[in-house]
Image (tube, grey):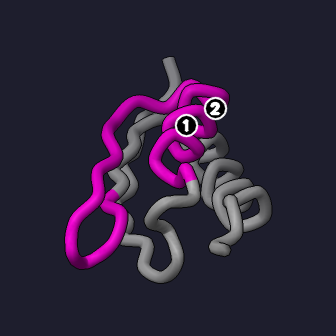
Amino acid sequence: MSERERLRAVIRGAVQGVGFRPFVYRLARGYSLEGWVLNSAQGVHVEVEGSTPALQAFLVALDRERPRGR
């Protein structure tokens, strides 16, 4: 059984109106991560849990594949 870790992040910038929350959800599911994502006045809050390699790959993909603002 692999050890699970949790990651919390707030993403600021052009994340409103570009499909960012659905993108984060699909990405997390692709790495078998569990958690949640929501919008607030401070940005998009993300909390995910899973294996360390999956969390690391998720962070890389989050930056590389994110939808760009208009």
Front one among 65 and 5:
65
Is label 2 in contact with label 1 (beta carbons under 8 Å)? yes
Instruction: For mark 2, give the secondary structure.
Output: loop
User: In front: 8, or 53?
Assistant: 8
Question: For residue 42: magenta?
Answer: yes
- Label 1 Cα crowd, 10 Å radius (few <14 / some 14-19 / many 20+): many
Q: Residue at x 65, y 44 (%)?
A: 53
Residue drawn 63% across the image and 49% down it = 58
Is residue 38 covered in magenta? yes
Percent x, y for residue 29?
56, 27
Q: Which residue is mark 2?
A: 31
The span shown in magenta is 19-45
Give residue 43's position: percent from left, percent from top.
Answer: 33, 72
24 horizontally vs 58: left or right? left
Quadrant of the rendered structure where residue 34 is?
top left
Observer-nearest of 8 and 64: 64
Identified by mark 1, the residue type is Ala
Seen in the image, is 32 located left or right of residue 4?
Answer: right
Circle on res. 28: 1
